[in-house]
Amino acid sequence: MILGKQGAGKGTQCMRLSRHYVVPHISSGEMFRAELKSGSEAGQRLNKFMKAGELVPDDVVIDVMAHRLTADGTKDKGFILDGFPRTTTQAEALFDLLAPEGLDLAVDLQVPTEVVLRRLAARRVCQDCGANYSVDSPPAVDWICDRCGGEVVQREDDREEVIARRLRLYEQETEPLVAWYLRHDKLVAVDGLGPPDVVTGRLVQAIDGRLGGAAA
Ligand code: ADP
Ligand code: ZN
């Protein structure tokens, strides 16, 4: 499971880790955005929280994630979790869900707030596959995704007012999980500054170091 502020690089790094360890990347945010795009009624309900940068209520999140983790033997085959849990209530629910084996490791991907603010303002994402770009490294052709041909746009919740709210919520609701996982002796911290390849290298080293390469 990867913890980190919005813009710390969780999405980008989780896609790479998912290829490296050949396990699915499960992102609560991506799942909610997909639900929204499907136009379902559940998606409509999520929209009002997500647009405002508010957290989706714990019971809704826990229900969705419990289904996802129990589907297709995911729980036993392994996975990378991104964006869940992000409250203590969710961490406790995940603990129960994964008992008795529990989570292998929680990684705290650390990036200073000044840096994530800059990254989020510049961030652009593919509407279809979720690939990340920025105004400084756009897709090759006119905001068309290099990977899937989808449209690359700014997320509605990456606007400045909403970003401030999301970061405040991170501090209040999610940062306490660092101490929570530390107490459970599951935490490893990784420096998220620097080129993506370098960060991926650090992550793999930290994960293999703690799990003895067993995750591979
Ligand atoms: P970010 O971490 O940058 O806010 P995500 O893509 O992870 O972006 O999530 C987008 C939105 O989805 C969040 O702002 C929130 O509204 C909702 N969300 C995702 N995961 C959770 C969660 N575990 N608990 C509550 N809300 C969530
Ligand atoms: Zn794409």
Image (cartoon, rainbow, N blue to C red):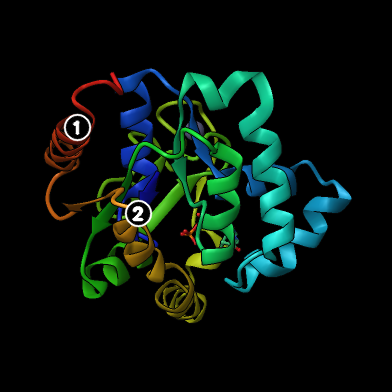
**Residue 5 visible in the snapshot:** no
64 is higher (above) or lower (below) than 115:
above
Q: Is mark 1 on a helix, strand or loop?
A: helix
Q: Is mark 2 on a helix, strand or loop?
A: loop
**Residue 191 falls left or right of residue 68:** left
Query: What residue lies at 65% left-to-right and 34% top-to-bottom?
Result: 68
**Residue 131 falls left or right of residue 118:** right
Label drawn at residue 184: 2
Considering depth in this image, is 195 or 90 the residue closer to the camera? 90
**Residue type (three-letter) at the residue carrying disc 2:** His
Q: Which quarter of the image is occupied by the C terminus?
A: top left
Q: Label 2: few (<14), some or many (≥20) within 10 Å?
A: few
Q: Name the residue under label 1.
A: 204
**Residue 99 visible in the snapshot:** yes
Q: Which of marks 1 and 2 is nearer the N terminus?
A: 2
Find the distance from the CA under tag 1 to the CA under tag 2. Answer: 21 Å
**Residue 63 falls left or right of residue 183:** right
Q: Where is residue 196 drawn, in percent x and y? A: 19, 41
Query: What residue lies at 73% left-to-right and 59% top-to-bottom?
Result: 59
Q: Where is residue 178 drawn, in percent x and y? A: 33, 63
Query: What residue lies at 49% left-to-right and 52% top-to-bottom?
Result: 83
**Residue type (three-letter) at the residue carrying disc 1:** Val
